[in-house]
Image: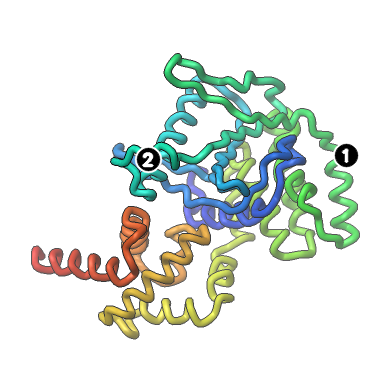
Amino acid sequence: MGDIAYQNKDIALKYFGDALKNKKLTVYGLPHIKIKDSRPTNLPAIEANELRIDNLFILEDDSYALIDYESTFGIQDIIKYVNYIARILKRFIRQEKGRRSGKGRKRLPIIHLIIIFSADISDIDPNILDVGCMQLKIEPVYLLRMDTAKVLSKIQCKVEMKEALDDDELLELIVLPLTVKGRAEKQALAEETVRLAQEIRDEEQRMQAIAGILTFADKILDRDYAKRIKEVIGMNKVEQLFFDEGVEMGIAKGIARGRVKGAAEGRAELIGCIRKKLKKGYAVIEIAEVLELEALYVRRIADLIQNEPEDSDVEIAEKLFREESVQQTAG
């Protein structure tokens, strides 16, 4: 996304994930896929860089779905997905504490690799990789087959009548810019669909539609335009999502600001709040922004929660206290 604020991208992804929850992908030609929830997508690696997957979901049957889109497709993309899936499995094993257990293999999840191809691609063999010891298969979606004009006209009518979109119409609107060929044409249609989405009466659906369009069209959108539109979503929306939950967040923010700083039970309450937000799919940067904490501090807590899922909030608080004591002594 170039110089677009990292926080703004996370906000867009949060709304996009919410837009897909509890929905079937029938409109994309995948009636057997029903999304239950999104999953955190920061995947640590041994390398210095951090691999990030934007669209990882858990399905109704508890299998996973990695959903992405491509307007070109080659061997480098195939290897990219091999790496993505390997790291998803590594994290799953670590969380399940099955790394050294023979039973760990039985708990590996089924992963659907769903690639939505823009109108520039008409046909791809779903068996995209076979190197003998490893095969990789995708579930392709071809947007070339979507009737762009018909879908756009239908949604325009509903928006003008101030009617809410149904699930299929929301999913159609999100990918509509990718149903035409050529970068300039996609950019123009993306701008048109964003303008249309901004007229949706229901505020939550409006933000979900805009976020979805930006998530899928980010590779072809003009960066300055995308940055302006992301500001429509804004950090204030994330703060509203948090503070609508009331007392819980107020207590956590109080702890974070130091009103009860140093109390073991206070630290545990803060960790419990962060744990809940992570489970709901909030990004570390969102949590840090609202709690007015350093992102690195929230990331450390998130890592402890992720790496030691059986530890209680109090146990994690004690580990943090010990780490800080060692650092102070060393300093």
**Residue 331 vertical position relative to residue 19 in the rendered view, above or below:** below
Q: In percent of the image, x 32 and y 63: which residue is there?
A: 311
Q: Can residue 176 be spotted in the picture?
A: no
Residue type at mark 1? Lys
Residue 103 badge: 2
Q: In percent of the image, x 60 and y 31: which residue is there?
A: 70
Residue 92 badge: none
State yes or no: discs 1 and 2 in contact (Cβ < 8 Å).
no
- Is residue 154 rendered to the left or right of residue 270? right
Q: Separation of disc 1 and disc 2 at Cα?
A: 51 Å
- Is residue 196 rendered to the left or right of residue 8? right
Q: Can residue 144 be spotted in the picture?
A: yes
Coordinates of residue 109 in the picture (x, y in percent): 49, 40
Q: Residue 114's image quarter?
A: top right
Q: In percent of the image, x 31 and y 41: which residue is there?
A: 101
Q: Residue 66's image quarter?
A: top right
Question: The C terminus lies in which quarter of the figure?
Answer: bottom left
Label tally? 2
Coordinates of residue 216 in the picture (x, y in percent): 63, 42
Q: How crowded is mark 2: few (under 14 residues within 10 Å), some or many (20 or more)?
A: few
Residue type at mark 2? Lys
Which colour assignment does the render follow?
A: rainbow
**Of helix, strand and loop, which one carries label 1?**
helix
Coordinates of residue 288 in the picture (x, y in percent): 41, 65
Between circles 1 and 2, the one closer to the viewer is 2
Question: Which residue corresponds to mark 1?
Answer: 150
**Residue 276 vertical position relative to residue 146 in the rendered view, above or below:** below
